[in-house]
Image (spheres, grey):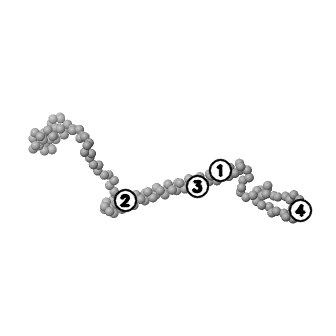
Amino acid sequence: IINNIQLTMPNTRSSISGREVLQPLGNIPTTPGRQVKALKSELEKKESENDTLKNNIADLTKALDSLNLVKEKAAYAIDSGSTAPKDIKKKTKDPDAPDPAMSAYRFFSDEMKKNDSSKAGKELQLLWKECKG
């Protein structure tokens, strides 16, 4: 074998007339070690191609998501006439939830309203400052 070309030598004089043409072996490795190296290099190439494709898909997905977000905001702005959607929704109060603790000022104002219903908010604030201070 010379330069990946297989040479065939005639064994007898009768085979000289039917001489065979030299045939290249091609890219086929001849030993198992060379086959392993060729397959490893081919696998590395495929893995790098796969990684670049995955990165391209991730970039395109991000771009598509941002376009969809802009599209939704624009559709909402056209429908409602405002510039941005309101993502905050008011939570409904749980009827079984306990009442929050009453503050001292709240207790004072409730008691003062029971005793004298003519007291307004500003008067209660002034009375609270006097009691506190």
Of the pair 130 and 38, the residue shown nearer to us: 38
Q: Which residue is mark 3?
A: 49
Of the pair 106 and 24, the residue shown nearer to us: 24
Work out whether mark 1 precedes mark 2 in sequence or the reverse, and give the earlier one.
1
Work out whether mark 4 precedes mark 2 in sequence or the reverse, and give the earlier one.
4
Q: CA distance from mark 3 to mark 4?
A: 54 Å
Q: Amino acid at mark 3?
A: Glu
Q: Which residue is mark 1?
A: 40
Q: CA distance from mark 1 to mark 2?
A: 49 Å
Q: CA distance from mark 2 to mark 3?
A: 36 Å
Is disc 2 surrounded by few (<14), some (14 to 19) or many (20+) residues within 10 Å? some
Q: CA distance from mark 4 to mark 2?
A: 88 Å
Q: Is residue 97 left or right of residue 31?
A: left
Residue at 50% x, 54% y: name it.
58
Residue at 27% x, 45% y: name it.
94
Which disc, if any, is residue 14? 4
Q: Quadrant of the C terminus?
A: top left
Q: Are marks 4 and 2 in contact (CB under 8 Å)?
A: no
Q: Amino acid at mark 4?
A: Ser
Is disc 4 surrounded by few (<14), some (14 to 19) or many (20+) residues within 10 Å? few
Q: Secondary structure at mark 3?
A: helix
Tell me: residue 81, above or below residue 98. Answer: below
Q: Quadrant of the N terminus?
A: bottom right
**Hey, which residue is sitting farthest bottom in the picture?**
17
Q: Are marks 3 and 1 in contact (CB under 8 Å)?
A: no
Q: Which residue is mark 2?
A: 73
Q: CA distance from mark 3 to mark 1?
A: 14 Å
Of the pair 70 and 98, the residue shown nearer to us: 98
User: Count the marks: how many?
Assistant: 4
Q: Secondary structure at mark 4?
A: helix
